[in-house]
Image (tube, rainbow, N blue to C red):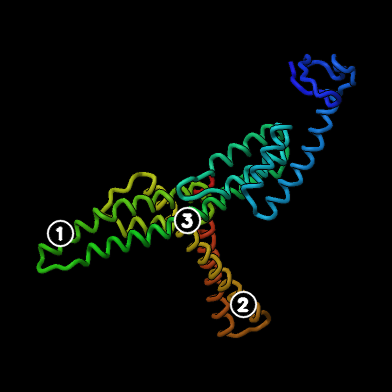
Amino acid sequence: MQKLQCSACGANLELPDELTVAHCMYCGAKIVLRGETALNEAVNLKRFAELAQIAIQAKNYEDAVKYSSLVLEIDTKNVDAWIIKAQATFWLSTARDDKFDSAMQYLETALRLNPADPRIMESQSQLRKTYAAWLNKRGLDALNHAREIYNIESNSYASGIMDMMVNSVNAKEESRGEYVETMNLFLTAADNDPDTIEYLQNIYTCAMEAKWNPWGPAVIEKIQILGRLNQKETVKNNITKIEKTLAEVKAKLKALEGKSGIWAKATRGDLEDDIKSLESNLRNEKAKVAIEDPTKH
């Protein structure tokens, strides 16, 4: 049953939900029920959708969440509203209230509604990268704080070797929590954006600065990945150098075409040997770089 008031006489009415049109039992006035409600919902849906779009563009994230939620109260399958709500929710995150998981859940809902919409996966990817960058920045701030605590304790007044040893122990204990927090931020950043090598480098830096802390398998794995990526980068640089040298040697050999004499013949032989050696080195280096990228699983 639906309760309403007659607009003509003000009488309080209670009518069945299935009715679309009724008449007031007191004054006989015609009352449009479902048709009017549907019209109002359509008007509100359009208005709320426009306000949500304006709010997200203006970076007014609280209003963007508010209006996209109002859209979803009317139309739970509105993909645009789910995307806006996800983006706005994420940007309302703070260090104490991380809303990333909630934002990703909204995008998962949108994806279930329309798996073919490329905007949803693009939003997921962008949010992950943005989230990783945010975590990395927080990690750098936490790392500086950890360093300050460690240095304060380590450099405390010491009158002898025993005091220095005590200071060292205190420095490690007092800064341990900060280093662990820092590492967790870097690890999560790397998990969400494995293509950014900076996050792996920061993991390595944190681990080396606090190498007295018993870091777990996750840290070791990321450092190993960094080592392989650095090795791969070195190989790529070697390939570039070899290719450049090879081109220069081939140019010298070409310049000897048509020339005769002992010197030309000897020089040509040396250059040909150099070319064979360089080409062999080039094949070896390319074989190394062909190894699967360890971050692509």
Reading the chain from its start, which is encountered first: label 2 or label 3?
Answer: 3
- Disc number at residue 253? 2
Q: Distance between the residues labelled 3 and 1?
A: 32 Å
Q: Residue at x 29, y 56 (%)?
A: 175
Q: Residues within 10 Å of mark 2 (few under 14, many from 20)?
A: some
Label 2 element class: helix
Label 3 element class: helix
The residue labelled by disc 3 is: 136
Query: How far across and down, in percent of the image, does residue 150 sit?
Result: 27, 61
Front residue of 269/103: it is 103
Reading the chain from its start, which is encountered first: label 3 or label 1?
Answer: 3
Q: Residue at x 51, y 48 (%)?
A: 295
Front residue of 44/178: it is 44
Q: How far apart are marks 1 and 2 (CA)?
A: 69 Å
The residue mark sitting in front, 2 or 3, is: 3
Q: Are marks 2 and 3 in contact (CB under 8 Å)?
A: no
Residue 292 visible in this rendered orientation of the protein = no
Query: How far across and down, in percent of the image, does residue 181 sit?
Result: 37, 50
Query: How far across and down, in percent of the image, does residue 276 sit?
Result: 54, 67
The residue mark sitting in front, 1 or 2, is: 1
**Which quarter of the rendering shows the N terminus?**
top right
Image quadrant where residue 69 sits: top right
The kind of residue on which mark 1 rests is: Val
* Vertical arrangement, residue 3 with respect to residue 45, above or below: above
Q: Which residue is drawn at 54% across and 44% down?
A: 100
The kind of residue on which mark 3 rests is: Asn
